[in-house]
Image (spheres, helix red, strand yellow):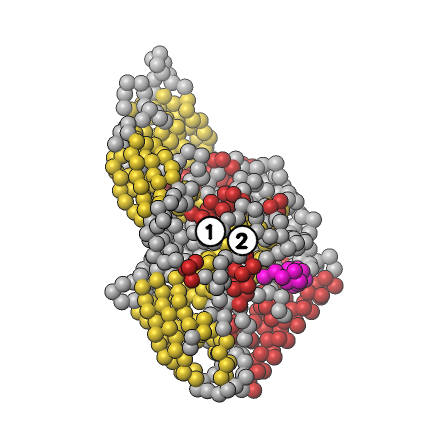
Amino acid sequence: MGATSPNLSAISFWEWTLFAALFFLIGAVTVWSADRVPDKDGMLTITPFQTATFVENEETASLIDGLSEFSTRLLFWADTARSPIMAVGRTVKSAYLPFYYQWRGTRLSSPKLDGAHVIDKVSDGYRSLESPRIVRITIGAELSIGAINPVDLLGDGVASIPVVVDNARNTPAKLILRNAVSAAGTEGSPYQSMELKPGQALGFFLRLGPAENTNTRRLVAQVGEQTHEFVVPFRHHESGTLRVEVIDETGMPTPARVYLTGADQRAYAPPNVIQRIVMGGQEQPFPGDCYFHTSGDFAVDLPAGTAIIEVVKGLEYLPFRTTVTISPDKLNAVEIRLQRKANLARMGWYSGDVHVHANLFAEKRITPGDVLLVAKAEDLNVVNVLPCNDPRTTIITDGQYFTGGPDAVSEPGYIVYVNEEMRNDLYGHVGFLNLKSFVEPAYFGWPHSPFPYDYPGNYPQAVKAKAQGGVVTYVHPGLPSEFPVDIALGVADTIDVMSQVDEETSTGYWYRLLNCGFRCPVSAGTDSMLNIPYHLIPGAGRVYVHTGQDLTYASWIEGFKQGRSFATNGPLLQFKVNGHEAGDEIRAENGPLRIEVVGGAESIVPMEAVEIIINGLPVQRIEAGSDPLAIRVAETLEITESSWVALRVRGAGHRLATNDREVYAHTSPVYVTIGERPIASRDDALFFIQQIDALISKMDEQGVFANTAQRDEIVQKFRQGQDVYRKIARQELRR
């Protein structure tokens, strides 16, 4: 069987898979341009890796890369408009999406793979950017230069000036940018020379300082015989050194996340430290903040004047924000003492992220020691690093760190465990936790690879993981995919309810699984890629697990499987039903049964309400009062049938809930069984039967198999999953 063109308007999960994979990772192993590897030291986004994977034409790839990197670099200035850059991110996707289809071997009804298609999209992207820092040069009937604001310059350094050139002519144009006059009084040598096609816009950063003994630089833009002389003014800043020590509640230096903005509105970071940017690729409302992780103390040169420092450490410390006056030519020392809002470890609760990548694309930039520092800075107790296949080679990136146990860098209170992400785009990506041996193959169903067929399916891979005591969770879940089958057949434990996709959607899927009677614990995995500076923050969505004892990986995994947990991007939850915590079961011979739901939420970000959820429906909403950082819950309810009960927090989006559109937290359920009757929702069971049928249709449209026997073997397993759901549907009818 071969792949055929999908109905893109009808297959929502196929669209989701493409966009998620394109933005986060394209998984394959042999590509057209395997030797075209981006310069990792100057790269901010994942785009250059993606285009190196599946865009054959280097000029086309360079155009897409240039827009992505140029626009993202503008985020280092606080006065850059954020929303146009987020829109540019979508433009970049739409520019290279057709090339991904072609690379996958999928036929489009109206493919646009010509260079003009990319030039138009990239040009529109450059024109849309908004920043007072940009110098705009327009090539029209005449050359024109837009308004030029003073360029900030620290000491005797060199400024990096963003320039956008727009050729408004219907003919090609060659722009030369040079000094107006050289030191000898002759025509200056060119700084930049670039050729533009008709209607094309391009951007670049011009490294420039003032002319000697002046505060300006006179430049000439030339196209053919036309010239336009203009002046770039500079605003000089004296500099001083800021030395910061971050102290925890015990008075000891502590790692943390730091946002630092100088008096020139630019984000700063110490030398030899990765400066990172809060991502906005999933419509997060507050993207673009720049930050870095510190081990506890750092020094950095800043312009004299008022600097803004903000320090964040996980969800149990209050964020700290202050201004500091930087005096020139001085060491300006600041001690920042963080205040604990909560200490869940004292009560046996430890946070974890089930889906983190140290590196992608065969890189070795980030070591387990670097992962540990980030974990400590984010106050994230357990980090599950998931090696996966590299797009350009047969390397399993980070696979060299797999040991079948906690990494040697782990410390008391902070554990790094290298596990595995097994990936197939047809059936869904799966996280294997608590592995003792690596499950092979780690990927299948990728074109141009040693494993091009969509076989053997996820089920037998999950069986291998479960056989060694592994935990199986579907990461960034979507439908149609295989998770309803594997959960029904007992080889998958849950789905990541919090991930880089919309929580409303994934929570809805999770509710349906619970309504079918499956006891799936809540799970959270960010899919953070630490070698990509513009990406998600690990642990910004995390799952807290009650181990009831000191932290070990074994106790954390056991609590995770039992559902003694809650997921959150800010609020910290307490929750009991009739004295039972999440993961417990309450049994009654008959109903109705009165239940007392007690607990609440504390948070470092404002909340709107806590909802009591029973069988997927909010039955009680407790609004935040005068203090949106604390909500108490004490409600008595009556239930008449077997149910699951949980708490959920609602809240508007907040800039410190970095990975998400809204403030969110959700407990795993307490299960209530009345009269030995299981929880069984006919509507939800029928929903999954339909989704499995949709997956089979998707296999027939897009799947690639060596023979029909491979396809039929997998479909037979899918039909077994449907039989489980049919049994569940019949159970409700008998009640």
Q: Tell whether position 463 is magenta.
A: yes
Q: Is residue 121 above or below residue 327?
A: below
210 horizontally vs 391: left or right? left
- The image quarter containing residue 147 is top left
- The image quarter containing residue 597 is bottom left
Quadrant where the image shows the N terminus: bottom right
At label 1, which amino acid type do we have?
A: Pro
Residue 384 numbered mark, or none: 2
311 horizontally vs 465: left or right? left
At label 2, which amino acid type do we have?
A: Asn
Q: Position of residue 560 (x, y in %)?
A: 52, 63
Q: Is residue 366 above or below residue 727?
A: above
| Residue lying at 45% horizontally and 71% vertically, measured from the top left | 581
Residue 548 numbered mark, or none: none
| Residue lying at 54% horizontally and 37% vertically, measured from the top left | 38
Q: Earlier in the sequence, mark 2 or mark 1?
A: 2
Q: Is residue 175 above or below residue 564?
A: above
Q: Position of residue 144 (x, y in %)?
A: 32, 31
Q: Position of residue 155 (x, y in %)?
A: 31, 26
| Residue lying at 51% horizontally and 37% vertically, measured from the top left | 40
Which residue position is annotated with label 1? 538
Residue in the foreground of this view, choosing between 308 and 480: 308
552 horizontally vs 652: left or right? right
Mark 2 surroundings within 10 Å by alpha-carbon count, few (fewer than 14), some (14 through 19), many (20 or more): many
Numbered disc 1: secondary structure: loop
Q: Main secondary structure of the magenta part?
A: helix
| Residue lying at 36% horizontally and 79% vertically, measured from the top left | 636
Q: Tell whether position 561 is magenta.
A: no
Mark 1 surroundings within 10 Å by alpha-carbon count, few (fewer than 14), some (14 through 19), many (20 or more): many
> How far is disc 2 from disc 1 in space, using C-alphas?
10 Å
Q: Which residues are magenta?
A: 458-471
